């Protein structure tokens, strides 16, 4: 299985491993990456108002949102749509022009000014616009100028088809037909002067019309058509347009514009396209109209109103938001971090005790350690010690020395225990002798990776005095158990657990053969870290054995892209890379591990998951696309609820230039396109989510404070407190507070 030809050389290099504590976590000198400023940015905040009937039209007048539909005109008031008076018949279009709200009803043209409604005309009209300061109204056959309360016809007819829209562009009136455009020259409609070059997308049907500076935008069912001067262009999926079946277009609030489609809304800003789909952002796929106010977009759909507000934030403020989220939503319990499941019968959220509660708590511990190293806040350090005690407890609660539990349950507490375990087998919940607790067994390599990664960070950045000794003991017991039991975790039944195996017998057999690179690297990371922190020769000897088996060579291609791809294994690999390359000093071994990291990073790079980016940059000093990574952090939704999402229909899924997707033929999704995800999930997954459970944002916090520690992210320069933190509130939004017994005393404290 393994090449041992260079073992003799490498055994000599083991003497270079230092057995004393490393001073903190070294930061690369003169890195090739540059810090990203934590500038104030606009954070998206979404909410929805569901309706039984479609919302057909929207407009904003004096900061108030008006919506049109089957029941006439409504306005947004106190988070609800209430009657706004005016026409009591179906309204197809709303426009706010020069301080007046215009409603184009099924039959009738209405206006609302100075708080009063009046009917201007009882006929049906298609559209309305401003032209040279005057109101122009379009019927199916003619254009009219409003003079007082009277409509005066501007043209002499001869349209080639029904007029569907009107816009003022280049000081000229343009009208929209289903298959083309015309302009009004004098009193006549002209078709031959609309364009000299290009055309609308072939076979397309126009849906809307908007004059926007130098452009006339025409949504069609085959892309967004753009008339510039007398030339047509088309913005399509290959240009970044998320979906080509467009329905409407509206001016934005910050040099942007918004596009409605039959499958979601799109914000176009600075050449980028932001997608807002059902069900996270809008209550229905089909968008009928969009209107923007001051840093807010209102999206009218067949299922109601989607509201996307933009609030000034810094990443530091966002970190404070997520820390408050963990408290208010009841996701912190006994020092662990839990997701929440929605109990539909009880209409409440309940904590879910999973396969990897301890592993997810480790990300929160990482965040606290990095934050303490940056801020030196003693309260943060105290919280880190608290979480470390729970992680240490996960090993102490089991009757097996060095065997950590996956999760801990207080008998009788209001929580949902996982019913399945590794490979779909039944969960192994084991009672403690006192009957107060149950611990989840069949522990996997995931947990060990998390313990080694996070406890080493705790040891270096936050632990003091007896806490350092407790961290040493904890690592020594777990890694010692693995070595003493033939490179496996051995459960209560005396057998190895399903996934925690690093023995050659397993890695040489078909079921474990594909894991030989990853598991071999994990084992090397364990003993290298344990020896560097404890100085115990037992771990040096264990490493010699692993090198004799050739595990170091197998690590080079640990990242698998064929025949299977497991994204959760990528997290395990980087959990192993980080301490392994921090503590490994032998040049020959570092050469192998660095090449392995470079290979893995090249595969992961396209996915833009900042935890991987920052680990790579911290270990190498190389450029790690941290600007892109920081943008990813900004694009996380403040709302951590698991909404359903769909992206497979989109037209902008091409792999971007400069990247290669080694596992699929499309680009990764951005945070707003999916549900919140931990760093073990697949950002290449196009569709998924649902169930409205709540994820914890501790992984985001881990990355943010890691970024601050290493200098990927600079501290904000603003001194405005409102942009640096969030107010503390005494509210409960998720699961009820934990009511079970307290955590027992932890040895060494």
Image (tube, rainbow, N blue to C red):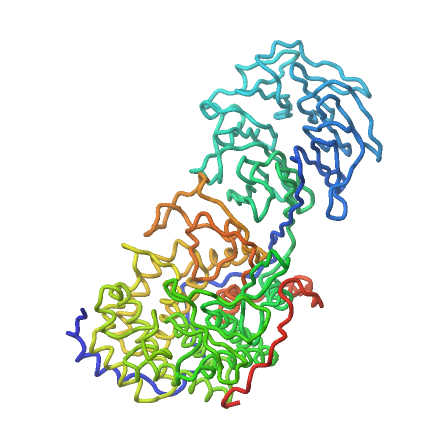
Q: Position of residue 746 (x, y in %)?
A: 52, 86
Which corner quadrant holds the N terminus?
bottom left
In the image, residue 544 sits, relative to residue 126, either above or below, namely below
In the image, residue 622 sits, relative to residue 14, either above or below, namely above
Picture quadrant of residue 305:
top right
- State whether residue 714 appears in this view: no
Front position in the image: 357 or 461? 357
Image-based side of 667 in relation to 486, left or right: right
Q: Position of residue 299 (x, y in %)?
A: 63, 40
- Name the residue at the left extreme: 5
- State whether residue 516 appears in this view: yes
In the image, residue 119 sits, relative to residue 141, either above or below, namely below
Front position in the image: 533 or 438? 438
Q: Residue at x 68, y 29 (%)?
A: 93
Picture quadrant of residue 319:
bottom right
Q: Position of residue 675 (x, y in %)?
A: 52, 54
Picture quadrant of residue 560:
bottom left
Q: Position of residue 733 (x, y in %)?
A: 66, 62
Image-based side of 446 in relation to 508, left or right: right
Front position in the image: 446 or 550? 446
Q: Residue at x 78, y 37 (%)?
A: 83
| Number of numbered discs overlaid on the protein picture | 0
Q: Residue at x 41, y 85 (%)?
A: 21
Front position in the image: 193 or 543? 543
């Amino acid at each position: 299985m393994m090449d041992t030809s260079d073992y003799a050389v490498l055994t000599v290099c083991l003497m270079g491993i230092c057995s004393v504590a490393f001073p903190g976590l070294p930061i690369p000198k003169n890195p090739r990456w540059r810090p990203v400023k934590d500038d104030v940015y606009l954070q998206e905040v979404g909410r929805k108002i569901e309706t039984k009937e479609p919302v057909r039209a929207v407009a904003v007048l004096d900061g108030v949102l008006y919506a049109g539909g089957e029941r006439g005109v409504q306005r947004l008031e106190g988070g609800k749509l209430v009657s706004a008076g005016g026409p009591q018949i179906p309204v197809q279009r709303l426009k706010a022009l020069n301080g007046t709200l215009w409603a184009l009803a099924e039959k009738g043209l209405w206006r609302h000014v100075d708080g009063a409604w009046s009917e201007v005309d009882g006929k049906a009209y298609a559209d309305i616009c401003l032209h040279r300061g005057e109101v122009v109204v379009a019927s199916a056959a003619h254009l009219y100028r409003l003079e007082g309360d009277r409509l005066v016809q501007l043209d002499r007819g001869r349209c080639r088809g029904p007029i569907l829209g009107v816009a003022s562009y280049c000081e000229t009136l343009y009208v929209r037909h289903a298959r083309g455009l015309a302009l009004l020259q004098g009193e006549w409609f002209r078709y031959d002067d609309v364009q000299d070059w290009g055309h609308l997308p072939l076979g397309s049907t126009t849906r809307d019309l908007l004059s926007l500076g130098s452009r006339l935008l025409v949504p069609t069912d085959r892309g967004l058509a753009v008339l510039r001067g007398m030339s047509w262009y088309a913005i399509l999926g290959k240009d970044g347009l998320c979906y080509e079946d467009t329905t409407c277009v509206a001016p934005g609030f910050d040099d942007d514009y918004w596009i409605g489609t039959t499958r979601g809304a799109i914000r176009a800003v600075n050449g980028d396209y932001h997608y807002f789909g059902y069900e996270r952002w809008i209550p229905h796929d089909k968008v009928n109209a969009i209107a923007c106010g001051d840093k807010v977009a209102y999206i009218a759909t067949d299922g109601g109103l989607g509201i996307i507000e933009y609030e000034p934030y810094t990443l530091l403020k966002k970190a404070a938001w997520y820390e408050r989220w963990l408290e208010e939503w009841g996701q912190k319990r006994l020092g662990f971090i839990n997701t929440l499941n929605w109990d539909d019968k009880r209409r409440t959220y309940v904590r879910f005790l999973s396969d990897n509660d301890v592993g997810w708590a480790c990300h929160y511990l990482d965040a606290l350690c990095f934050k303490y190293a940056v801020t030196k806040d003693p309260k943060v350090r105290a919280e880190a010690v608290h979480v470390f005690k729970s992680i240490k407890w996960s090993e102490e609660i089991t009757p097996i020395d060095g065997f950590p539990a996956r999760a801990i349950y207080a008998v009788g507490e209001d929580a949902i225990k996982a019913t399945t375990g590794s490979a779909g087998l039944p969960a192994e919940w084991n009672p403690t002798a006192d009957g107060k607790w149950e611990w989840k067994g069949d522990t996997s390599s995931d947990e060990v990776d998390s313990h080694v990664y996070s406890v080493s960070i705790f040891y270096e950045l936050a632990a003091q005095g007896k806490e350092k000794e407790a961290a040493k003991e904890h690592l020594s017991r777990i890694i010692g158990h693995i070595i003493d039991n033939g490179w496996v975790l051995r459960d209560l039944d005396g057998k190895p657990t399903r996934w925690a195996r690093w023995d050659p017998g397993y890695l040489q057999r078909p079921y474990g053969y594909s894991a030989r690179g990853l598991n071999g690297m994990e084992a090397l990371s364990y003993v290298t870290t344990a020896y560097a922190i404890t100085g115990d020769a037992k771990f040096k000897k264990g490493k010699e054995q692993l090198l004799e088996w050739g595990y170091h060579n197998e690590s080079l291609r640990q990242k698998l892209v064929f025949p299977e791809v497991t994204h959760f294994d990528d997290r395990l690999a980087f959990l192993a890379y980080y301490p392994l390359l921090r503590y490994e000093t032998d040049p020959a071994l570092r050469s192998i591990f660095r090449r392995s990291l470079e290979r893995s990073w090249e595969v992961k790079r396209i996915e833009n998951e900042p935890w991987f980016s920052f680990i790579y940059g911290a270990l190498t000093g190389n450029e790690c696309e941290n600007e892109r990574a920081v943008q990813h952090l900004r694009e996380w939704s403040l709302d951590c609820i698991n909404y359903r999402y769909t992206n497979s229909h989109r037209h902008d899924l091409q792999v971007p230039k400069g990247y290669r997707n080694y596992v699929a033929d499309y680009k990764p999704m951005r945070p707003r396109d999916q549900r919140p995800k931990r760093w073990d999930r697949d950002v290449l997954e196009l569709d998924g989510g649902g169930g409205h459970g709540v994820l914890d944002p501790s992984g985001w916090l881990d990355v943010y404070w890691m970024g601050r520690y290493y200098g990927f992210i600079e501290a904000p320069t603003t001194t405005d407190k409102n942009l640096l933190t969030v107010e503390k509130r005494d509210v409960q939004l998720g699961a009820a507070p934990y009511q079970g017994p307290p955590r027992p005393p932890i040895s060494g404290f």
